């Protein structure tokens, strides 16, 4: 018998690391996202008792994949048996279906001998491309992929896409039904189909990285499993489409941003601002690779939003110290980014370097205009940035109000601890 605590931890680790692979492999058998997701959830639940009884398997992903696939095939058999017994069915298909399911059994047995790591890139990309089919609205593509490929809970997906939980749940349900009704195939698209899906796939990988870089909720600042998964997908996509400038741009952006991973929190888990981070510990290999990708992209002449974002992040990383950052150049790059991607989030992010280049009062006016605009209602970083600008201007009481607003919207415990410390500082500061 294995200790229940050890089994619980092993199942939790397998959920973080292997959810996407297990689901993708099960979808290939079930050909139905709802059925596949249900079977994968049952497999994880079954692992809690089976692993306590039999021990934690050497390859949890293989065990879970086999269990989920078998559940899917059992469910398909039950459904076909039921249909074959219905009256008025002109031509029962159970014999044909049984042959097909027997073939799937044989295929499953062959695949059990394959190391899951050998097929993860293809399986995950298949699932991403399925979710990013042009028949789905872009919002549905992003939502479905974050839910299925990332395994993010619906509330976290809603936070990432700035909508309510109810709206997000309905959006995900509609997207799954449309995939089923339209018989969208679970496969990598043909080369001619790739460009039509590229924008959505890039957006999905970027959002996946964002959810890993700063987790929407939970005790830790990061979910490194999601950050690693997004980097892996970005590299795989670059191998698939090596000449696409925006594929190179996205990979560069992820590399240069992730290079700071080891320095974003202190030894006790406290969030460290960019100005506090030890730049000597940044991953110089990743930064050099990103720089090569940026230079190659700029030489190509086609400059898209990810390449510009990568250039912005690279400027932050190149500065010897935070104070020596080329703030005017970063503001200029944000202006370029806004022309390519007129997003209120981009406009908000621009106010940070603007406050360093032209002062916090100028930046605060733009933050307040975005607040009045209303599109960032519920976005925790708007009141957080506003609070910091008010703090720098010495408007203590107003800063405290903004910090409280940010706290109400923040679910990540590391960020909450940082905001709480800032709020306490404002509340105890003499008038």
Image (cartoon, rainbow, N blue to C red):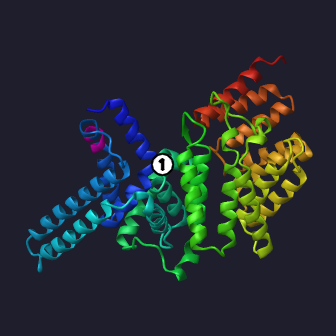
Quadrant (top left, top right, bottom left, bottom right) of the N terminus = top left
Residue that badge 1 annotates? 152
Q: Is residue 418 above or below residue 41?
A: above
How far across and down, in percent of the image, does residue 370 sit? 74, 49
Residue at image coords 89%, 51%: 326
Residue 226 higher or lower than 400, as above or below: below
| Left-right relation of 44 to 166 | left
**Residue interval drawn in magenta:** 46-50
| Residue 180 pos. (x, y %) | 35, 68
The number of discs equals 1
* Residue at the (30%, 33%) spot, across then down: 2
Q: Residues within 10 Å of mark 1 (few under 14, many from 20)?
A: many
Q: Nearest the camera: 89 or 312?
A: 312
* Residue 48 belongs to magenta span: yes
Decide which of 28, 90 is in the foreground and name it: 28
Left or right placement of residue 91 versus residue 325 in this view? left
Residue with the most extreme bottom position: 192
| Residue 171 percent location from the top left of the image | 46, 58
Q: Quadrant of residue 172?
A: bottom left
Examine the rendered structure and indicate whether residue 211 appears above or below residue 137: above
Compared to 93, does 77 lie above or below? above
Residue 43 location (% of width, % of height): 30, 49
- Element on which disc 1 rests: loop
Indicate the quadrant containing the C terminus: top left, top right, bottom left or bottom right: top right
* Residue located 18% across and 73% down the image: 97
């Amino acid at each position: 018998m294995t200790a229940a605590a050890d089994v619980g931890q092993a199942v939790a680790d397998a959920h973080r690391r292997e959810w996407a692979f297990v689901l993708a492999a099960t979808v290939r058998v079930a050909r139905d996202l709802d059925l596949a997701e249900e079977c994968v959830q049952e497999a994880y639940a079954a692992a809690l008792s089976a692993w306590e009884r039999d021990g934690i398997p050497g390859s949890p992903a293989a065990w879970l994949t086999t269990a989920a696939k078998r559940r899917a095939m059992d469910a398909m058999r039950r459904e076909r048996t039921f249909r074959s017994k219905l009256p008025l069915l002109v031509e029962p298909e159970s014999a044909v279906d049984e042959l097909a399911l027997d073939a799937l059994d044989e295929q499953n047995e062959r695949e059990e001998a394959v190391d899951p790591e050998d097929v993860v890139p293809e399986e995950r990309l298949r699932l991403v491309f399925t979710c990013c089919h042009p028949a789905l609205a872009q919002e549905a593509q992003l939502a479905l992929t974050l839910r299925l490929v990332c395994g993010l809970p619906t509330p976290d997906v809603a936070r990432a896409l700035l909508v309510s939980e109810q709206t997000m749940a309905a959006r995900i349900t509609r997207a799954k039904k449309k995939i089923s009704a339209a018989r969208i195939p679970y496969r990598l698209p043909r080369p001619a189909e790739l460009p039509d899906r590229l924008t959505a796939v890039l957006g999905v990988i970027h959002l996946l990285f964002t959810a890993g870089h700063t987790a929407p909720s939970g005790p830790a600042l990061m979910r490194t499993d999601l950050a690693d998964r997004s980097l892996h997908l970005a590299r795989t996509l670059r191998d698939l489409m090596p000449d696409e400038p925006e594929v190179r741009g996205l990979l560069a952006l992820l590399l240069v941003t992730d290079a700071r991973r080891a320095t974003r929190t202190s030894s006790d888990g406290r969030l460290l601002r960019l100005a506090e981070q030890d730049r000597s510990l940044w991953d110089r290999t990743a930064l050099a690779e990103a720089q090569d990708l940026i230079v190659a992209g700029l030489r190509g002449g086609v400059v898209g939003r990810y390449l510009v974002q990568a250039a912005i992040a690279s400027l932050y990383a190149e500065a010897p110290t935070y104070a020596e950052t080329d703030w005017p150049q970063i503001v200029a790059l944000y202006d370029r980014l806004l022309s390519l991607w007129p997003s209120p989030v981009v406009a908000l992010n621009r106010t940070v370097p603007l406050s360093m280049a032209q002062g916090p009062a100028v930046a605060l006016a733009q933050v307040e205009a975005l607040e009045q605009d209303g599109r960032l209602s519920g976005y925790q970083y708007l009141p957080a940035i506003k609070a910091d600008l008010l703090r720098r201007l010495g408007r203590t009481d107003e800063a405290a109000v903004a910090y409280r607003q940010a706290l109400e919207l923040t679910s990540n415990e590391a960020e909450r601890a940082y905001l709480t410390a800032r709020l306490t500082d404002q509340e105890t500061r003499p008038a």
